[in-house]
Amino acid sequence: MSSRAALPSAPPAPDRLVRVGCPAHNCGGRCLLIAHVRDGRITRLDTDDRPDTLAAPQLRACVRGRAYLQRQYHQDRLTQPLKRIGKRGAGKFAPISWDEALDLVASEMQRVKATYGPTALFVPYGTGSYNQLNGSHAARRLMNLFGGCLGIYNSYSWGAINIATPTVYGTLQTGNQRQDWLNSKYILMWGWNPAEMRDGTNSDYFIKLARERGARVVCIDPRHTLSAASLADEWIPIRPGTDTAMMSAMAYVMITERLVDAEFIRTHCVGFDGTQMPAGCDDAESYTDYVMGTRDGTPKTPEWAEAITTVPRDTIARIAREYAITKPAVLYQGYGMQRRAYGEQVVRAGCVLAAITGNVGISGGWASGLANQAPDAPFWTLFPAGDNPAKAAIPVFLWTEAVLRGKEMTSADGIIGVDRLTTDIKLIYSVASNILINQHANVARSARILQDESKVEFIVVQDQFLTPSARYADVILPACTQFETWGVEDGWKYGDEVILMPQVVEPLGETKSDYRICAEIAERLGIGDAYTEGRDERAWVEWCLDHYRATRFPELPTLDEFERSNIGVYAKPVTRPGVAFEAFRADPEAHPLSTPSGKIEIFSQQLHAMDRPDEIPAVPKYIEEWESPFGAEAATYPLQVMGHHTLHRVHSTHDNNDWLEEAFPQRVFINPIDATTRGIADGDPVKVFNDRGAMILPCRVTERILPGVIDIPQGAWWTPDEDGIDRRGNVNVLTSERWTPLAFGTAQHTAMAQVERA
Ligand SMILES: Nc1nc2c(c(=O)[nH]1)N[C@H]1C(S)=C(S)[C@@H](COP(=O)(O)OP(=O)(O)OC[C@H]3O[C@@H](n4cnc5c(=O)[nH]c(N)nc54)[C@H](O)[C@@H]3O)O[C@H]1N2
Ligand SMILES: Nc1nc2c(c(=O)[nH]1)N[C@H]1C(S)=C(S)[C@@H](COP(=O)(O)OP(=O)(O)OC[C@H]3O[C@@H](n4cnc5c(=O)[nH]c(N)nc54)[C@H](O)[C@@H]3O)O[C@H]1N2
Ligand code: SF4
Ligand SMILES: [Mo]
């Protein structure tokens, strides 16, 4: 320095530094932030500064965590309760007092329950908060204490994989701990994009380490993802929705070239071929029958699969050989390809490849399927929502059906707990959710359904922003952010961590925590004490920590110790990574699976008994999707629509974050071949449309996407103009409400559309 600036007379007081879990939402990660606090305001967010080891790596934040202040102090934050004054959905609201708002919500809950019964009340899926005691869990506890409501099961995330995985393995806990990937020699990232879509903090880091150790990494995805670019040795583009065809052809190569692990199949599996069919199914089609085409006359050769998938036959055969021979190997299935028509098949087919190559139950191997971590799957929710006295539950994706024709729904529509519903949904209390409009399929349809006040009579939305769903509310309750209340969270699917989320600053304006809002409604319903059990938010966090300590981590610090040390996170080091199915592998008779046969069910007797072979075959099969390039619809709508999980957002959360928009502007990605034939240049505004809706947004012309496929990153806020054309680019304008046959899961990624110059 050549000259010295004058020092200020007194140095400013240092910022208070607080280690705090990132608000995360349902982002797929769980990371640690360091909040710099000055004068009651967070001025800066850093990330994990603890020692970094393989056994307990740092939980380093992604761009969203680091850009969080743009959300925390956004000018559009809701600060007071609002009541609708225009038509429902018109987005016109007037401020009201908390007393007025909460009295209204409590009285509507009582009215609807008295008129229609408890199952007319509904809390939709909502993943905005995974802090244990915020978000929709808080509302579920309220409803359950109030006498119950219509329940939900399954998820938007993992609809098909949740149901299909246990048909093979009898469990969802099919994943080794990730440090074990370093023992792997070959890793297939199949429709899996951990560099962009967080799937456990550090999953991409462990893949990088495995590759440094010599593992070959191959990425199979219609898009040249950030994972393909930064983690893989090879990218194989594939036509969306056709992966089961490639997997079947890989099995064909393995069977004809005798590359399968015949001994493991004999001792640990059923249904591979005619010699091991379950009793009573001796004449049914085995997996080998299907692959060789002995019954249907179509051998599932690489040539056959090339025509379906666009992957060259030689590539399919080579990947089959590499995966079967280079052991131990990982075939990691992402979830995007099971959020599709017949999503169950691709899950089962991936599991079968892992099984017939003998990669199950060994270090460096991988069983595929949902892959919750062995030995300790996460808790997900710990704060006790209690039992639902109403018993009835719908598959989560079918809520619009329960609005339109709840009374007609039976087990054929996936209803559980009762034979049939006695009422349609009449009141919706939506907390930490943008499902009502933005995140459910076919936005225009949902909007039409919700606009009709004779159907759902009362809608409450509890959020931090006036989201597209909130615009359809009758009352909006403003929730504070995670930095403004107490919380705690554990790892996503992986990770032996418990992360503290202490309150860092005061709630903005009149906002309150979800817990506090629900407690105040409970008070009005005469169940206030039952709801709180005398605890505030901090006391419930202490309760959660005590529960974790009693059930999982005896060495977990107390809340006082956490606070005194400002350590922020407890991480149990993984020194000997757990391996799923280790005991079963060693002795399948002594440690049977909880499938009907006790073995890995390549052929599922349960599915066979459903007697719907065209949609729910007993062995995994490629089934042409109901909207595809092969159907008549392709003449009008020739492009397959994808909507990947982008770094910009956590679903719709952060869509209004300017920094992230600058880094990842919302665009439709299209291949130069498709752009040129339409006279479209990079950056042009284009119209994307099908029978369900239309949008206009800028395009990105790039070879990083397969011809015939477009990608509109999911989660943008639906912003219709006066003609109903979305101007922001919400992919659900184009998606269909049709569900998968077995799981009643979302098939939002199966959709066709057309693009033209705007
Ligand atoms: N950045 C970010 N990360 C997230 C989230 C987020 O919103 N943003 N959300 C989290 C949540 S809740 C979830 S459930 C998970 C979701 O995780 P996923 O469902 O796995 O994420 P997607 O991006 O939908 O899909 C993953 C990849 O699959 C590819 N793909 C789609 N269809 C096909 C297909 O038919 N075949 C093949 N081979 N590939 C296909 C996509 O191009 C994409 O690269 O992500 C979590 N992580
Ligand atoms: N086309 C298509 N659609 C999809 C998907 C896809 O891949 N493609 N993915 C699906 C998947 S996997 C999922 S998980 C769903 C996610 O769908 P949602 O669960 O609806 O998740 P978000 O869109 O993030 O909406 C969460 C809302 O919670 C609010 N919020 C955040 N924190 C808090 C809080 O502490 N309290 C309250 N009250 N509100 C809060 C946010 O502002 C936001 O509006 O979307 C599904 N929709
Ligand atoms: S991955 Fe999730 S928890 Fe981690 S910094 Fe990003 S948004 Fe936060
Ligand atoms: Mo999800």
Image (tube, grey):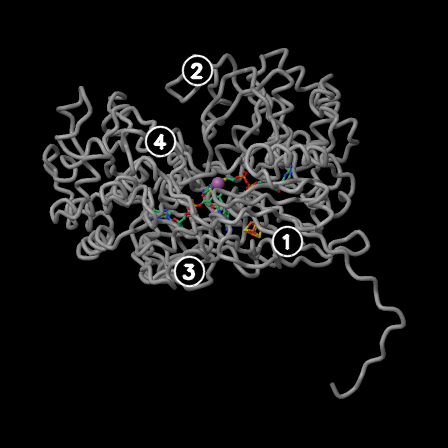
Residue 715 is left or right of residue 218, and the answer is right
Q: Which of marks 1 and 2 is nearer the N terminus?
A: 1
Mark 4 or mark 2: which is in front? Answer: 4
What's the mark number on residue 290?
Answer: none
The amino acid type found where label 4 is placed reads Pro
- Residue located beneath label 4 in the image: 166
Q: Which of marks 4 and 2 is nearer the N terminus?
A: 4
Let me know if residue 344 appears in the view.
yes
Separation of residues labelled 1 and 2 (CA atoms): 49 Å
Position of residue 149 measured from the top left corner of the image (x, y, whole percent):
57, 19
Q: Which of 723 and 40 is in front in this view?
A: 40
Label 1 lies in ligand 3 vicinity (Cβ under 8 Å): yes
Marker count (numbered) = 4
Separation of residues labelled 4 and 2 (CA atoms): 29 Å
Separation of residues labelled 3 and 2 (CA atoms): 51 Å
Q: Which residue lies furthest to the right in this view?
A: 9
Quadrant including the C terminus: bottom left
Mark 4 and mark 1 in contact? Answer it, CB < 8 Å. Answer: no
Position of residue 272 measured from the top left corner of the image (x, y, whole percent):
18, 35
Q: Residue at x 75, y 20 (%)?
A: 524
- Residue located beneath label 2 in the image: 408
Q: Which of marks 4 and 1 is nearer the N terminus?
A: 1
Mark 1 and mark 2 in contact? Answer it, CB < 8 Å. Answer: no
Mark 4 Cα-neighbour bin, 10 Å: few <14, some 14–19, many ≥20: many
Separation of residues labelled 4 and 3 (CA atoms): 30 Å
Mark 3 Cα-neighbour bin, 10 Å: few <14, some 14–19, many ≥20: some
- Residue located beneath label 1 in the image: 33
Residue 386 is left or right of residue 355, and the answer is right
Separation of residues labelled 4 and 1 (CA atoms): 36 Å
Quadrant including the N terminus: bottom right
Mark 1 or mark 2: which is in front? Answer: 1
